[in-house]
Image: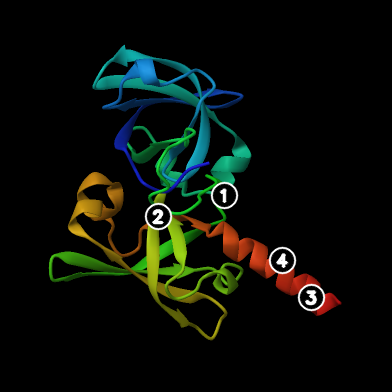
Amino acid sequence: MFTGIVTAIGTIASVHQRGDMRLKITAPLDPARIDIGASIACSGVCLTVVERGGTAGDAWFEVDVSGETISRTVPAMWEQGARLNLEPSLRLGDELGGHIVTGHVDSVGEVVLVAQEGGSWKVAIRARAEMSPFIAEKGSITVNGVSLTVNDVRDRPDGTCDMRLNIIPHTAEVTTLGALKEGDQVNLEIDVLARYLKRMQSLAAKG
């Protein structure tokens, strides 16, 4: 379980095929605090640490990525040199600073607008039709592993929707969201509460 509060930006140092895809990710973390078998959210994708090493502030860890995971996420995020938002899983007693995030990507969205507004950036992301019912104004959404609040939702005739978000300077600096540009694809995870409400609504309609 995660909160969508990124603690570091990692870089894919190498990519190898071993049945599944094996990634080596470097990051300014302490390897002593990375446990084998631990879960780390990598740009919104929950992955399991299988190897780790390095020194404090210059760590590396390895994860395996299945074909199923690759098929449901942004393809370019698995390339050597790609930068990833990292968040270790919650520990008992940790502060829930964002919202409840599972690390299971629901869909890929497309950035359709990036505009500076004051010191922040206004970003619009187009979500696929199957995602639209789960996105609400002032609700939560996870974008590349980052917990954000939806400022506005604009439905489109084809069933897709454009959600507008605000990226403050701090978020732009400590995550990869500051580098977003129009046409980029992003990993999206809907709020788990919206998922349950949608299920309850569908069951009530059948009854």
Mark nearer the N terminus (2 vs 3): 2
Mark nearer the N terminus (1 vs 3): 1
Mark 1 or mark 4, which is nearer to you? 4
- Looking at the rendered structure, the secondary structure element under dot 4 is helix
Q: Residue furthest toward the right?
A: 207
- Looking at the rendered structure, the secondary structure element under dot 3 is helix
**Marks 2 & 1, CB-CB < 8 Å contact:** no
Q: Residue furthest toward the front?
A: 93
Q: In the image, what residue type sits under mark 3?
A: Ala
Around disc 4, counting alpha carbons within 10 Å, would you say few (fewer than 14), some (14 to 19), or many (20 or more)? few
Query: Which residue is located at x 41 percent, y 21 percent?
Result: 34
Along the horizontal axis of the image, is 92 left or right of 14?
A: right
Q: Nearer the viewer, residue 148 or 128?
A: 148
Q: Which residue is identified by label 2?
A: 147
Mark nearer the N terminus (3 vs 4): 4
Q: In the image, what residue type sits under mark 1?
A: Arg
> Residues under labels 1 and 3: Cα distance?
29 Å
Residue 47 versus residue 51 in the image, above or below: below
> Residues under labels 2 and 4: Cα distance?
22 Å
- On the image, the x and y values in percent for residue 167 come to 26, 61
Mark nearer the N terminus (2 vs 4): 2
Q: In the image, what residue type sits under mark 4?
A: Arg
Q: In the image, what residue type sits under mark 2?
A: Ser
**Marks 1 & 4, CB-CB < 8 Å contact:** no
Query: Which residue is located at x 46 percent, y 49 percent?
Result: 74
Residue 148 versus residue 22 in the image, above or below: below
> Residues under labels 2 and 3: Cα distance?
30 Å
Query: Which residue is located at x 50 percent, y 83 percent?
Result: 156
Mark 2 or mark 1, which is nearer to you? 2
Q: Which residue is identified by label 4?
A: 199
Q: Which residue is identified by label 1?
A: 72
**Marks 3 & 4, CB-CB < 8 Å contact:** no
